[in-house]
Image: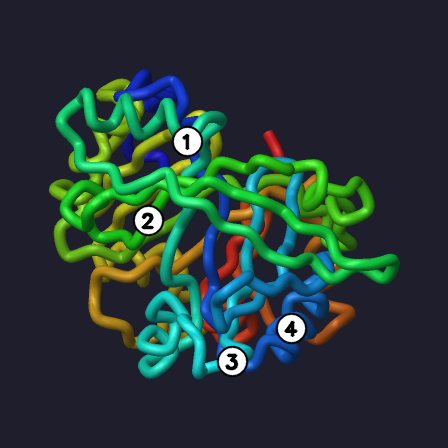
């Protein structure tokens, strides 16, 4: 997206809002999803199980940011509406922003006239060969109109050392960083401008058919359906999903040729050239996956 001058991470409502923490990928078959992402060249960390909920996950931990594959293991328990998401499709359906202090962040949000809910406690078992450990989080929620065109919340990690082991950060495809999330929107300008209270005016860049918010960790890109097809249509069919929906993730890799070699050897079709590789949504549980080289 080179149609506008580069933006800089802005100063928004709170210094405790530090960027994009992770994406959430809803899947109908958790074990099949784990295998699919491993085939793409990612190291998948051991399974987690949310306490008191009917959901479990596998995570792909990156040096900056991560990907959460989320599925239902007990439909009789609370699923946080994941069951409704999966009635229509698999794929990315939500995003978590990052915070270094959930309580202070909630106070800053309220002082700025936003309407935070929380922080709320969340724990999950992480199933390790030598016994389960218990990662803990604080979550802060905002109403839908304060995170337009995107289901989002804020995550404060209380025990990051439990989920960011060095061996889980090494990936055969060279993945290093969650660089961007692309949201298909009928109103990218309205949606993108809605994030200026969170990340500040200097975070904004815009062009024909897109608006981008550059955060300290990763970017949010709001694009029209036509612009989405221009960006990623060469990689195969774009899923037919009514806008708005989070359509694509951009992952920085250490070496693009290395990533291409992994995909080719494993029979994964992709499109691209010198600047990027795009894997169709069908190969990545419903989410378009773009690889770019680290700057």
Q: Nearer the viewer, mark 2 or mark 3?
A: 3
Q: Residue at x 26, y 50 (%)?
A: 223
Circle nearer the N terminus (4, 1): 4
Question: Is residue 271 something one can see in this rendering?
Answer: no
Disc 2 versus disc 1: distance between alpha carbons? 15 Å
Disc 1 versus disc 3: distance between alpha carbons? 29 Å
Disc ID at residue 102: 1
Residue under label 2: 152
Q: Residue at x 31, y 33 (%)?
A: 213
Circle nearer the N terminus (2, 3): 3
Q: Looking at this rendering, what residue extends furthest in the right direction?
A: 130
User: Which element carries disc 4, helix, strand or loop?
Assistant: helix
User: Which element carries disc 2, helix, strand or loop?
Assistant: strand
Quarter of the picture containing the C terminus is top right
Q: Nearer the viewer, mark 3 or mark 4?
A: 3
Residue under label 3: 74
Residue 171 x, y percent position in the rendering: 75, 51
Disc ID at residue 36: 4
Disc 2 versus disc 3: distance between alpha carbons? 24 Å
Disc 4 versus disc 2: distance between alpha carbons? 25 Å
Q: Is residue 268 left or right of residue 71?
A: right
User: Which element carries disc 1, helix, strand or loop?
Assistant: helix
Q: Is residue 111 left or right of residue 22?
A: left
Disc 4 versus disc 1: distance between alpha carbons? 33 Å
Residue 211 x, y percent position in the rendering: 24, 39
Q: Nearer the viewer, mark 2 or mark 1?
A: 1
Residue 58 x, y percent position in the rendering: 63, 63
Q: Residue at x 31, y 77 (%)?
A: 84
254 is higher (above) or lower (below) than 47: above
């Amino acid at each position: 997206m080179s149609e506008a001058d580069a933006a800089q991470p802005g100063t928004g409502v709170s210094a405790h809002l530090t960027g994009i923490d992770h994406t959430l990928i809803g899947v109908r078959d958790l074990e099949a999803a784990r295998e699919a992402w491993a085939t793409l060249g990612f190291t998948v960390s051991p399974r987690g199980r949310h306490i008191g909920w009917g959901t479990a996950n596998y995570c792909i931990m990156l040096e900056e940011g991560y990907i959460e594959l989320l599925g239902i293991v007990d439909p009789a328990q609370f699923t946080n509406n994941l069951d409704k998401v999966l009635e229509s499709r698999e794929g990315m359906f939500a995003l978590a922003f990052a915070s270094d202090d959930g309580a202070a962040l909630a106070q800053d949000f309220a002082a700025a006239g936003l309407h935070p809910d929380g922080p709320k406690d969340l724990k999950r078992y992480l199933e390790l060969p030598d016994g389960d450990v218990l990662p803990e989080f604080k979550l802060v929620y905002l109403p839908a109109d304060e995170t337009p065109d995107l289901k989002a919340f804020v995550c404060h990690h209380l025990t990051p050392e439990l989920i960011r082991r060095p061996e889980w950060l090494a990936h055969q495809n060279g993945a290093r960083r969650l660089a961007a999330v692309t949201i298909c929107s009928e109103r990218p300008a309205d949606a993108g401008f809605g994030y200026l209270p969170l990340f500040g005016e200097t975070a904004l860049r815009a062009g024909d058919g897109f608006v981008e918010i550059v955060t300290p960790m990763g970017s949010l890109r709001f694009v029209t359906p036509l612009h989405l097809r221009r960006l990623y249509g060469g990689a195969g069919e774009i899923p037919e999903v009514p806008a708005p929906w989070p359509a694509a993730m951009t992952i920085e890799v250490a070496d693009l040729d290395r990533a291409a070699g992994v995909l080719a050897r494993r029979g994964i079709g992709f499109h691209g050239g010198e600047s990027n590789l795009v894997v169709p949504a069908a190969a990545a549980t419903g989410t378009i996956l773009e690889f770019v080289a680290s700057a």
